[in-house]
């Protein structure tokens, strides 16, 4: 101001006196102005940072005709104007406004219409706090100054609550048990002036003590601590609030924590307890507990053993917990203590329990555990494994059973399975031993099975079965050779080796692909030496594969023929053909069937199948067919296998003339043919039974008669037998005599079976020499089991005045037919007669043979001989002298004798009785 006044002096004449006088005047004015500034009123304005502020400045004049020329705003700490309103050259309503960019910039605006006028500033900052002066220059009146003391209030910026360990808490503190104590610290950052900090508990002030602590960087923060001790159930969900404030214009900054607490149950009770329970009946037992936070865990126990099959429900407020036990009572539970236990798992204190003693029994409760020295994750093949079965039962179990995958295990030391009481030992386990194992305890009330224990047996890789082992590959053809192994664990590594007659090399890893327990190698043969054998090796952490998977690479070719073909299921219109497959030539093969009609070679069916099995339909009944079976692959087809087959014929119809069909009232049906067949079969069976019984009866009677003496009478044409004329015997060979006459029958009353006289198979033995005959018969039974003696003798009509018996030999004794006749003059006692026939060893009969009549022979050939027997000779005839020895076998006729009408014919019938 003084300098401006000095410049104005230059307009006056320069004289030293005037200068001195003017300087004195200016000095006086400045002194007066300084004295006036000291008397300028000061207005205090407070504003919260971020809010707008309005600084008052009175621009009214006492002279109504006066006007405002200039309004200047100063900031005392700067000394230069920061805002101006210049209306000296224009109307004040259009005055020019200017704002310092370093102070208010575009945030300031002047409002002259206000009373008093105001300088508005938006978004006030903490740095805007200062003493501001407003200077108003009038046209007439003196310049007016006014001051505004602007105070900017900065609210607290952040509150952090921490526990004693320094962990920051946001919404919940705890949980704490009853009687616990804790300390909280509330740190308030920011705020101008320094905020006041206080703790509230459920809106009640607990403490308002705080201290200012340095924060670093020239800043500080305020801390307040809260100590809470002796917590009880009433303190749960309490609100602990830390509040900070430094003005009454903004709401206090606060942070609230909710107090969380854990409580044990207050009570537990079984509803409807102390009542007898019936065995086999289902009960829903209720147990109720209250007062626990969080809700109590309710468990049911029976003699210290926890029971399952429970269901829990919690009330809406979480205070009451109810557990329902579905319990099926049994007699074995009698005397056990059934209890309900409520506890808070979070707290270390014991829970509450209620229970009563049961009057029932229970079935066995089994539990399987692995041996304590065994780790279930490290069991491998060859390891010895043992299990223990823990059983709780009343009465005690009488049997413990072990099961593998649901099947019962038996004690077998050879197989490595040893069962001893309630223990199971598996020696040298293998991969087949793996699976679920359970133990079952049995008592008089039933059985109880344990939970399954899965035995995981790890083993080194081994080649998987049923893989393609032979690959037929052409040259320059890329083949994908797949190798699959069984391994546990399945994380395996593969290595391939190619081997031929010349070399053995490892396959590069770039040609090998692996997926789980499978590996595929890409191989392309180029020359003949590239055909050979690929060996696949696998390994896991258990070990290496002992025997590699072997794959043979051969030059691809046609498949081999099928074999072992058979035609089955033949019907009138269809049949089935099944063959065994041959070598596929190294490539996948299929099969082809061509069915042709045998005569015309017309194709009736053409079928293909991936397996050598065909079912042909649509054939004609009774047709003859030729089936050709081929195997084929990409290289061609094999030679055919030709099969001849035929379908069944249609049923034959019995056609009758139309006239007869009208006359006949009887119609033959298939059912009737079945009935006739059944009746015929029954008749044949009955006939066979009768014949067998007859044969047995005669044999038994013959054995009995052999011990008795028989008498044979001669000269009357009487002969032992049951037939009255010439007949054919059922067994052996017989002679037929021409001109034979009927023979009379003997009367017999032997009962059910015929007498000796009527049985042609019984040969009476003489009284003399009985022991010798019996001994000979006994030896004969050991020599031959073939019945070769004739069943019946052929009876011949004797010549007048002659009678006697003829000798014979069966067909098996080897005597020719033409030699059966001998010279009639030969004597019977001459031993040389029998020499040519010494080879005749069958039949091996005793010497006491019965011969037929000899009356037809020439006189004097055979003397008339009488045997001693049980039957007397007919009356009127003299009894001949007894015979002491049997008659040797004598051939009939001679070589020089011509056959005549009296010469007997020999008819042989060969039949074995074996």
Image (cartoon, rainbow, N blue to C red):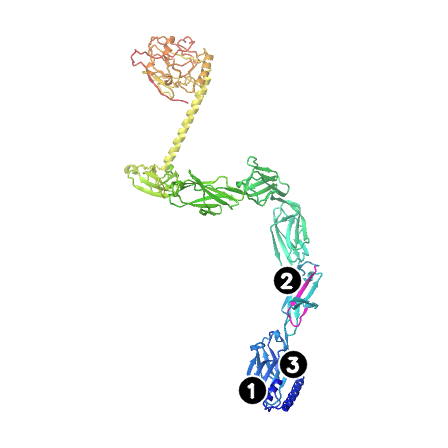
**Label 1 Cα neighbours within 10 Å, binned few <14 / some 14-19 / many ≥20:** some
The Cα atoms of the two marked residues, 2 and 3, are separated by 44 Å
Image location (x, y in percent) of residue 405: 54, 43
- Point 40% across, 27% down: residue: 687
Q: Are marks 1 and 3 in contact (CB under 8 Å)?
A: no
Q: Which residue is mark 2?
A: 168
Mark 2: give few (<14), some (14-19) or many (20+) Cα within 10 Å.
some
- Find residue 162 and report its horizontal and vertical position in percent: 65, 63
| Residue 595 visible in the displayed image | yes
Image quadrant where one finds the C terminus: top left
Dot 2 falls on a residue whose secondary structure is strand
Residue 731 position in % (x across, y down)? 38, 21
Camera-near label (2 vs 1) is: 1
User: What residue is shown at x 29% (from left), y 14% (from top)?
Assistant: 901
Q: Earlier in the sequence, mark 1 or mark 3?
A: 3
Q: Is residue 475 left or right of residue 212?
A: left
Image location (x, y in percent) of residue 836? 36, 12
Q: Is residue 761 above or below residue 148?
A: above
Identify which residue, 355 or 746, lies in the foreground: 355
Check disc 3: other Cα within 10 Å, few if <14, some if 14-19, many if 20+.
some
Upstream in sequence: badge 2 or badge 3: 3
Q: What element does badge 1 sit on?
A: loop
Q: Which residue is disc 1 drawn over? A: 88
Q: State yes or no: discs 2 and 3 in contact (Cβ < 8 Å).
A: no
Mark 3 = which residue? Answer: 43
Query: Are circles 2 and 1 on residues that touch, CB within 8 Å?
Result: no
Residue 191 magenta-highlighted: yes
Q: Quadrant of residue 455?
A: top right
Span shown in magenta: 180-197
Residue 1 visible in the snapshot: no
Q: Nearer the viewer, residue 252 or 443?
A: 252
């Amino acid at each position: 101001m003084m300098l401006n006044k000095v410049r104005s002096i230059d307009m006056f004449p320069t004289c030293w006196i005037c200068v001195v006088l003017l300087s004195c005047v200016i000095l006086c004015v400045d002194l007066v102005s300084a004295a006036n500034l000291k008397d300028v009123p000061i207005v205090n304005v407070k504003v919260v940072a971020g809010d707008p502020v309005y600084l008052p400045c009175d621009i009214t004049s006492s002279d109504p005709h006066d006007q405002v020329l200039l309004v200047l705003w100063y900031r005392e700490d700067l000394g230069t104007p920061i805002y101006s309103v210049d209306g000296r050259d224009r109307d004040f309503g259009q005055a020019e406004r200017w704002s310092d960019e370093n102070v208010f910039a575009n945030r300031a605006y002047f409002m002259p219409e206000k009373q008093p006028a105001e300088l508005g500033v938006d978004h006030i900052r903490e740095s805007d706090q200062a003493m501001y002066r407003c200077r108003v220059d009038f046209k007439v009146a003196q310049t007016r100054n006014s001051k505004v003391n602007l105070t900017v209030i900065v609210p607290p910026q952040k509150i952090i609550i921490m526990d004693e360990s320094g962990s920051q808490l946001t919404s919940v503190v705890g949980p704490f048990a009853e009687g616990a104590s804790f300390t909280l610290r509330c740190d308030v950052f920011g705020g101008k002036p320094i905020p006041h900090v206080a703790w509230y508990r459920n809106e009640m002030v607990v403490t308002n003590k705080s201290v200012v602590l340095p924060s670093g960087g020239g800043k500080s923060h305020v801390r307040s601590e809260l100590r809470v001790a002796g917590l009880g159930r009433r303190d749960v969900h309490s609100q602990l609030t830390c509040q900070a404030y430094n003005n009454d214009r903004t709401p206090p900054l606060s942070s609230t924590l909710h107090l969380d607490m854990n409580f044990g149950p207050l009570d537990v009770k079984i509803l409807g307890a102390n009542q007898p329970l019936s065995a086999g009946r289902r009960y829903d037992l209720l147990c109720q507990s209250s007062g626990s936070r969080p809700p109590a865990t309710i468990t049911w126990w029976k003699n210290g053993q926890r029971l399952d099959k429970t269901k829990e429900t919690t009330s809406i407020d979480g205070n009451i917990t109810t557990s329902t036990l579905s319990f099926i009572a049994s007699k074995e539970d009698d005397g056990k203590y059934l209890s309900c236990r409520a506890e808070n798992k979070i707290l270390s204190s014991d829970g509450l329990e209620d229970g009563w003693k049961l009057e029932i029994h229970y079935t066995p409760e089994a539990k399987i555990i692995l041996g304590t020295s065994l780790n279930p994750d490290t069991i491998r093949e060859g390891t010895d494994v043992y299990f223990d079965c823990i059983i709780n039962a009343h009465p005690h179990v009488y049997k413990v059973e072990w099961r593998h995958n649901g099947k019962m295990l038996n004690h077998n030391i050879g197989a490595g399975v040893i069962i001893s009481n309630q223990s199971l030992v598996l020696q040298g386990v293998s991969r087949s031993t793996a699976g679920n194992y359970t133990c079952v305890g049995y008592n008089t009330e039933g059985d109880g099975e344990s939970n399954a224990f899965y035995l995981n047996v790890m083993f080194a890789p081994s080649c998987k079965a049923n893989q393609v082992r032979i690959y037929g590959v052409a040259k320059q053809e890329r083949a994908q050779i797949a190798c699959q192994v069984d391994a546990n664990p399945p994380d395996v590594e593969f290595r391939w080796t190619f081997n031929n007659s010349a070399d053995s090399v490892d396959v590069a890893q770039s040609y090998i692909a692996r997926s789980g327990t499978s590996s595929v190698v890409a191989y392309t043969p180029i020359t003949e030496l590239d055909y050979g054998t690929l060996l696949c090796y696998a390994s896991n952490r258990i070990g290496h594969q002992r025997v590699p998977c072997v794959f043979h690479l051969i030059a691809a070719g046609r498949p081999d023929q099928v074999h072992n073909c058979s035609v089955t299921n033949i019907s009138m219109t269809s049949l089935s053909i099944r063959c065994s497959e041959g070598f596929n030539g190294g490539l996948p093969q299929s099969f082809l069937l061509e069915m042709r009609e045998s005569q015309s070679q017309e194709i009736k069916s053409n079928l293909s199948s991936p397996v050598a099995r065909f079912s042909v339909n649509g054939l004609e009944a009774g047709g003859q067919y030729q089936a050709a079976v081929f195997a084929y692959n990409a290289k061609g087809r094999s030679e055919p296998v030709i099969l001849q087959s035929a379908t069944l014929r249609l049923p034959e119809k019995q056609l009758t003339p139309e006239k007869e069909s009208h006359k006949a009232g009887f119609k033959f049906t298939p059912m009737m043919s079945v009935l006739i067949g059944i009746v015929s079969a029954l008749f044949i069976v009955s006939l066979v039974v009768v014949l067998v019984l007859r044969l047995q009866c005669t044999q038994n009677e013959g054995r009995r008669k052999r011990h008795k003496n028989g008498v044979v009478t001669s000269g009357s044409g009487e002969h032992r037998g049951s037939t009255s004329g010439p007949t054919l015997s059922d067994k052996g060979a017989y002679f037929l005599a021409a001109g034979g006459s009927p023979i009379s029958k003997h009367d017999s009353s032997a009962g059910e079976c015929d007498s000796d006289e009527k049985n042609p198979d019984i040969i009476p033995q003489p009284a003399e020499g009985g022991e010798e005959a019996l001994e000979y018969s006994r030896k004969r039974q050991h020599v031959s089991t073939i019945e070769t003696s004739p069943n019946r003798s052929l009876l011949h009509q004797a010549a007048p005045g002659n009678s006697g018996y003829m000798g014979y030999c069966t067909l098996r004794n080897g005597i020719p037919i033409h030699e059966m006749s001998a010279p009639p003059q030969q004597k019977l006692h001459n031993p040389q007669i029998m020499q040519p026939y010494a080879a005749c060893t069958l039949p091996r009969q005793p010497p006491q043979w019965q011969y037929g009549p000899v009356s037809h022979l020439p006189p004097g050939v055979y003397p008339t001989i009488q045997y001693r027997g049980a039957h007397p000779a007919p009356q009127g005839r003299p009894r001949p002298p007894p015979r002491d020895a049997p008659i040797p076998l004598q051939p009939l006729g001679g070589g020089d004798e011509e056959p005549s009408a009296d010469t007997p014919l020999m008819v042989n019938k060969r039949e074995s009785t074996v």
